[in-house]
Image (cartoon, rainbow, N blue to C red):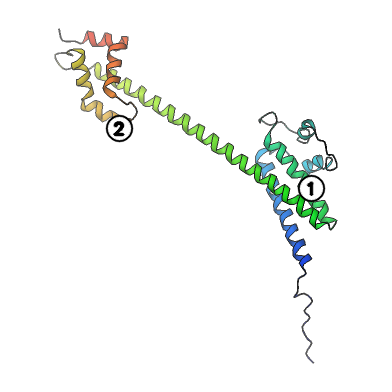
């Protein structure tokens, strides 16, 4: 005689789905908070910081000193770190959600873990903003330093060319400026270091270097046509 298959495991009660969903959210939030802790405060132990923060689960008024004392090591960060503040409260809501879920209070657990997830998202967003700001600053600094370096190279090349006049010496200042400006050696050098856009008006730049730089002026006068 064949037994009819039992269908008691084929049907899922809405409460089972609810419990499964909240359990998954709590687990994901926990992993996310662990990663934030590891990235920002690597010397801290997750279990230890959970224990330190847990003592404030029933404390409505929490001072900054209370928050900062939950960290057992010192880090280079702003005095009242936004990340630390939001992390602390994300942990408060995560730990509260965990307790409520274990007690079967699914609605409260969902409310708490939703807020924990929101605060965690803020931390990720803030970190992204800081990373982008740092990257832009580095790029800006690098670009500025690169430009200064190229200008320095152009000045050096100009001085070298000035020390190598035509066989009969340099002519007038205007002629000398034009000769160096149109020199193949000079234009090739500018192209080689990719400095075509570094100086807006190259001829004016050469003029300033020749006339107003005392060293260049002395070299020019010593190598003029007699």
> In the image, residue 11 lies at what x, y percent?
75, 74
Q: Is residue 45 in sight in this rendering? A: no
**Dot label at residue 95:** 1
Q: Nearer the viewer, residue 215 or 87?
A: 87
Question: For this view, does 218 lie left or right of residue 124?
Answer: left
Q: Nearer the viewer, residue 25 or 40?
A: 25
Residue at the bottom extreme, as displayed: 1
Q: Is residue 91 above or below residue 6?
A: above
The answer for how far apart the CA atoms under marks 1 and 2 are is 61 Å
Among numbered discs 1 and 2, the one appearing first in the sequence: 1
Q: Residue at x 43, y 31 (%)?
A: 143
Q: Nearer the viewer, residue 164 or 209?
A: 209
- Tag 2 secondary structure: helix
Q: Is residue 209 above or below residue 58?
A: above
Q: Residue at x 21, y 28 (%)?
A: 184
Res. 66 image quadrant: top right
**Dot label at residue 84:** none
- Quadrant where the N terminus is found in the figure: bottom right
Residue highlighted by disc 2: 192
Question: For this view, does 86 lie left or right of residue 163?
Answer: right
């Amino acid at each position: 005689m064949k037994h009819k298959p039992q269908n008691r495991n084929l049907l899922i009660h809405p409460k089972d789905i609810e419990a499964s969903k909240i359990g998954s959210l709590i687990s994901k939030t926990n992993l996310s908070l662990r990663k934030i802790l590891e990235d920002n405060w690597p010397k801290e132990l997750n279990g230890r910081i959970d224990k330190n923060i847990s003592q404030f689960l029933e404390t409505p008024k929490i001072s900054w000193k209370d928050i900062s004392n939950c960290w057992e090591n010192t880090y280079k960060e702003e005095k009242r770190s936004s990340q630390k503040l939001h992390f602390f409260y994300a942990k408060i809501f995560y730990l509260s959600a965990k307790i409520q879920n274990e007690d079967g209070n699914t609605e409260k657990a969902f409310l708490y873990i939703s807020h924990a997830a929101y605060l965690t998202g803020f931390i990720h967003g803030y970190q992204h903003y800081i990373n982008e700001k740092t990257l832009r600053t580095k790029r800006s600094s690098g670009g500025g330093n690169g430009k200064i370096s190229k200008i320095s190279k152009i000045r050096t090349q100009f001085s070298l060319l000035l020390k190598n006049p035509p066989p009969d010496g340099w002519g007038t200042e205007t002629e000398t400026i034009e000769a160096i400006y149109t020199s193949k050696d000079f234009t090739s050098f500018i192209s080689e270091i990719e400095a075509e856009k570094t100086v807006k008006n190259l001829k004016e730049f050469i003029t300033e270097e020749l006339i107003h730089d005392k060293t260049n002026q002395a070299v020019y006068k010593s190598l003029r046509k007699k």
